[in-house]
Image (tube, rainbow, N blue to C red):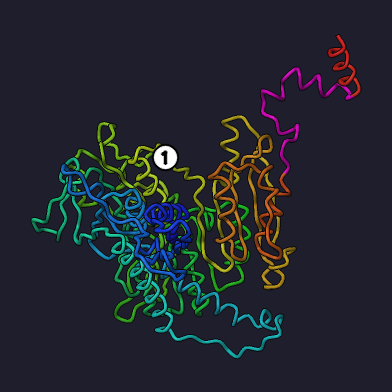
Amino acid sequence: MSSLSLRISSSVAATARSESDHRLRLLSSSSPTVATSPALHFCGLRTEALKLGANSNRWKVVSAAVAPQNGSASDEFDYNLVIIGAGVGGHGAALHAVEKGWKTAIIEGDVVGGTCVNRGCVPSKALLAVSGRMRDLQDEHHMKAFGLQVAAAGYDRQGVADHANNLASKIRSNLTNSLKGLGVDILEGVGTILGPQKVKYGKVGSSGNVITAKDIIIATGSVSFVPKGVEVDGKTVITSDQALKLEFVPDWIAIVGSGYIGLEFSDVYTALGSEVTFVEALDQLMPGFDPEIGKLARRVLINPRKIDYYTGVFASKITPAKDGKPVMIDLIDAKTKEPKDTLEVDAALIATGRAPFTKGLGLENIRVETQCGFVPVDEHMQVIDADGKLVPHLYCIGDANGKMMLAHAASAQGISVVEQISGKDNVLNHLSIPAACFTHPEISMVGLTEPQAREKAEKEGFEVSVAKTGFKANTKVLAENEGEGLAKLIYRPDNGEILGVHIFGLHAADLIHEASNAIALGTRIQDIKFAVHAHPTLSEVLDELFKSAKVGRTGSLGPEMKSSPILHWLKSTSLVQVWHLLLSKFST
């Protein structure tokens, strides 16, 4: 996972505000109402409401609850909702459930925050913040352009590691306090489903405690995927879990995999002085990105840095360093499986993705079979059993279902499930969920890549257009002296539907949300191009991008309209002829 989205949504504030306003009672018709802080609603705190006394103009203080609190379950169940897993997805679902007035519990066998907060997107952002500053300080030409003179930049490895660890601790504490503040029961131990609406929790091997719930959500997340033949010792052959501790900075490190995780760590290691060698099984680096964005990113993020790479090869065997020998990596051709080369490096980072953590959940007790470890679900995240039937009152969100392995996607799925349980039909549009890679510069995306969009258009019979704009004309970008960048819009010219947006450049991870929200809300280009953007800001890159799109062209009509006799007649008829025809019709 590459990003964390802590949801403090406007709906939370709005719901809490309406509830608190309802509770506040004016003791005098002349008494003013005092607005309460939305921040207090989220934190589960209480605030003071003020009123005028009957015979006085002085304020008096009365206490009023402003935040939703954990509700009470029916006599039939211990809880309305039990969530197995207190990562970002489970946390988002729990908060939304409390808003509904449900009695909610969350089971966690490790620490609150899950992978993202403790071993993923949060501490990695701390390391990337360091690498970004190091790159600025090391770029003498860049500094001179600002009129700045900087001595040789250095770093304290332990200080950098402490920064990452302290950030994870702070966010973990914030999540824990938000759950406790709202009255969510945090149950420690491993959760196991015993049967319909029944869960056991406790230490592995113990009898545990059994609770019942009207509905259950599985949110157990994922773990680092380690391919066969790779021996991880946690020191010289590591996964992202150990890399985030930054126990040492190797002179030369091989990174197996060039996706989000591999790219971000290459940014960190090269900024701190390491040489990097990528080992990628597919034929090109960055295979999951839009090809045009990937090509530009390789030119900026790979070629100028101390990075070389192998593509189309597997690391069939990786042996940790020991007895004075380096880490040994045997490479074979990904297609023929013939030996290609052997690398001897100081360390190897295994960045081959994530695997669902679903063992020990007791899925066999409800006849659910995983698919490559993932829990099968429908579009509402409801679990599907071995017979293809929906399991009543059981849902699975986040990495464990494999639909979209991102922390904020898990949170969105959790909220969607709570809405579904409450009786509101809610289907999450995964094509509207953005993703980001926090390199320097950043990469972000939402929706379809250009090849995906053209494949979809081929099947469904519509045309695809592409609009692009660079960063170099943007005033804010020029002020920052960070002109390298590209924004790309993939859309339907016939109706203005946004199919995908891809950005490479300064603060791309922040810019993408205008596009993702537009897709989520169904906003068309012909509407969003009239939105006003503050000047001078980076957001004007998106403004220019949407304004450059051409919507409603004749050549963009669907195949049915293109062959329409009416269209051919209009093409061959002048406006004067059409006008005379209309006049003759109305005159008769």
Label count reads 1
Question: Mark 1 — residue?
Answer: 426
Quick check: 300 above or below 450?
below
Classify the position of the C terminus by image quarter.
top right
Where is residue 416 drawn, in percent x and y? 39, 45
Residue situated furthest front in the rendering: 55
Secondary structure mostly seen in the magenta stretch: helix
Q: Nearer the viewer, residue 259 or 187?
A: 187
| Residue 50 at least partly seen | no
Classify the position of the N terminus by image quarter.
bottom left
- For this view, does 239 lie left or right of residue 447? left
Where is residue 248 drawn, in percent x and y? 39, 80
Q: Residues within 10 Å of mark 1 (few under 14, many from 20)?
A: some
Q: Nearer the viewer, residue 339 or 263?
A: 263
Residue situated furthest left in the rendering: 207
Where is residue 346 drawn, in percent x and y? 40, 76
Magenta-drawn stretch contains 569: yes
Start-end of magenta stretch: 550-575
Which element type, helix, strand or loop, lies under badge 1?
Answer: loop
Q: Nearer the viewer, residue 46 or 408?
A: 46
Magenta-drawn stretch contains 531: no
Q: Quadrant of residue 525?
A: top right
| Residue 134 at least partly seen | yes
Q: Residue at x 63, y 41 (%)?
A: 524
Where is residue 580 drawn, in percent x and y? 90, 18
Q: Quadrant of residue 148?
A: bottom right
Quick check: 485 above or below 167?
above
Q: Residue at x 20, y 62 (%)?
A: 188
For the residue marked with disc 1, what is the amino acid?
Asn
Residue situated furthest bottom in the rendering: 151
- For this view, does 385 lie left or right of residue 419? left
